[in-house]
Image (tube, helix red, strand yellow):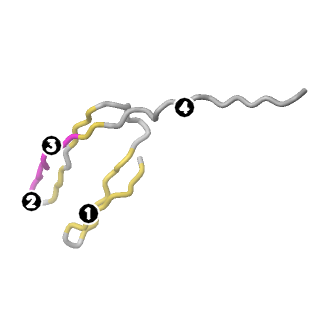
Amino acid sequence: MQLIERENLAAHETWFPTSSPHLKPMTKYFFRLNAQNQFGTINGQILNFTTQGPAAATTPTVSTAAA
C-alpha cells in the first residue's frame, strides 16, 4: 500500500493508505476508520468507493522493414 494522504488531527498526524495493488477493478469496497485511546474507541462512519475499470485496450502497431 502507498501512504500518501494525511490528516492533521490536533497535535497528531495520521496516515491512511490510499492505494493498493490488490484491489480488483470495477469493485465496490467499504471501509471505516476507528480511533482508540485510554478513554475508549470511536468508530467512524462507514464509507465506500468503487475502483475504476481496466485501462482501455489499444490496437497493437506492426512495423515492417525491407529484407
Residue at the extreme top: 67
Along the viewing direction, whichever of 3 and 61 lies nearer the viewer: 61
What residue did someone put label 1 on? 7
Q: Residue 46 shows which numbered tag?
A: 3
- Is label 1 in a helix, a strand or a loop? strand
Q: In x, y percent, where is residue 65? A: 83, 31
Please name the residue shown 12% across and 52% down the image.
41
Q: Amino acid at mark 3?
A: Ile
Residue at the extreme right: 67
Along the viewing direction, whichever of 26 and 24 lies nearer the viewer: 26
What residue did someone put label 4 on? 58
**Quarter-of-image position of residue 23:** top left
Q: Is residue 36 above or below residue 66?
A: below
- Is label 2 in a helix, a strand or a loop? loop
What residue did someone put label 2 on? 39
Q: In x, y percent, where is residue 10? A: 19, 71
Q: Around disc 1, counting alpha carbons within 10 Å, would you say few (fewer than 14), some (14 to 19), or many (20 or more)?
A: few
Task: Evaluate if marks 1 and 3 touch, with contact meaning CB atoms under 8 Å apart.
Answer: no
Position of 66 compared to 18: left or right? Answer: right
Q: CA distance from mark 2 to mark 1?
A: 21 Å
Please name the residue shown 9% across and 59% down the image.
39
Q: Amino acid at mark 1?
A: Glu
Indicate which label's residue lies in the foreground, 4 or 3. Answer: 4
Q: Amino acid at mark 2?
A: Phe
Q: CA distance from mark 1 to mark 3?
A: 18 Å
**Quarter-of-image position of residue 58:** top right
Segment colored magenta? 39-48
Indicate which label's residue lies in the foreground, 2 or 1. Answer: 1
